[in-house]
Image: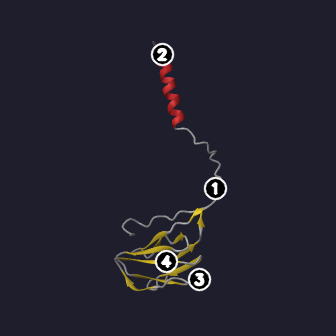
Amino acid sequence: MHLGNLTLATVVLSAGLVACGSSGASGSGTMGPPGPSPQAATVAATAQLAFSPNAVTIAPGGTVTFAFGTVGHSVKFDTGTNPPGDITGVNANTSIARTFNTAGTYTFHCTIHPQMTGTVIVAASSTTNNPAPPPGYGP
């Protein structure tokens, strides 16, 4: 009887190890081809006078939503081919979206707080995911 319980325990333990085992990937760090860029991202203009995240990547035709908290900010596009319209004025407690149709790199800053800078990269494929904005920001 004791031997039977030991055998049963061995089978259960082995089954558990197999269920938790590898999917066959070697874990060598080799990545496949880049996946498609996301169609949307959110950039928060924070009370700490920073854009967060300060760089995002989207696909052509994708949208970036600029989420403005309690401190007023603006968005002025400095570079890029056919950038969307600037977000002028003093914007607080609102979100404003802009669509980027042309691939390229678009840098921007806040005209109210010029030290606040950011980048939108518009590319058909990407190897990175956009980080989430801070809690309390976003659509």
Between the C-alphas of marks 4 and 2, the distance is 67 Å
Q: Amino acid at mark 4?
A: Thr
Numbered label attached to residue 4 = 2
Where is residue 93? Give x, y as percent: 34, 77
Q: Amino acid at mark 1?
A: Gly
Numbered label attached to residue 51 = none
Residue located at (46% from left, 78% from top) = 98
Where is residue 77? Give x, y as percent: 52, 83
- Which sits in the foreground, 75 or 48? 75
Name which quarter of the figure residue 92 lies in.
Answer: bottom left
Q: Mark 3 vs mark 4: which is more N-terminal? A: 3
Between the C-alphas of marks 3 and 4, the distance is 13 Å
According to the picture, the residue beneath numbered tag 4 turns out to be: 99
Residue located at (55% from left, 38% from top) = 21
Q: Mark 3 vs mark 2: which is more N-terminal? A: 2
Query: Mark 1 falls on what kind of element?
Result: loop
Q: Mark 2 vs mark 1: which is more N-terminal? A: 2
Q: Mark 1 vs mark 4: which is more N-terminal? A: 1
Position of residue 3 in the picture relative to residue 123 (left or right): left
How many numbered circles does the render carry? 4
Between the C-alphas of marks 2 and 1, the distance is 47 Å
Are dots 3 and 4 in contact, CB under 8 Å? no
Query: Mark 2 falls on what kind of element?
Result: helix
In this view, the mark in front (4 or 2): 4
Between the C-alphas of marks 3 and 2, the distance is 74 Å
According to the picture, the residue beneath numbered tag 1 turns out to be: 32
Q: Amino acid at mark 2?
A: Gly
Quadrant in which the N terminus appears: top left
According to the picture, the residue beneath numbered tag 3 turns out to be: 81
Are dots 2 and 1 in contact, CB under 8 Å? no
Q: Mark 4 vs mark 2: which is more N-terminal? A: 2
Q: Residues within 10 Å of mark 1 (few under 14, many from 20)?
A: few
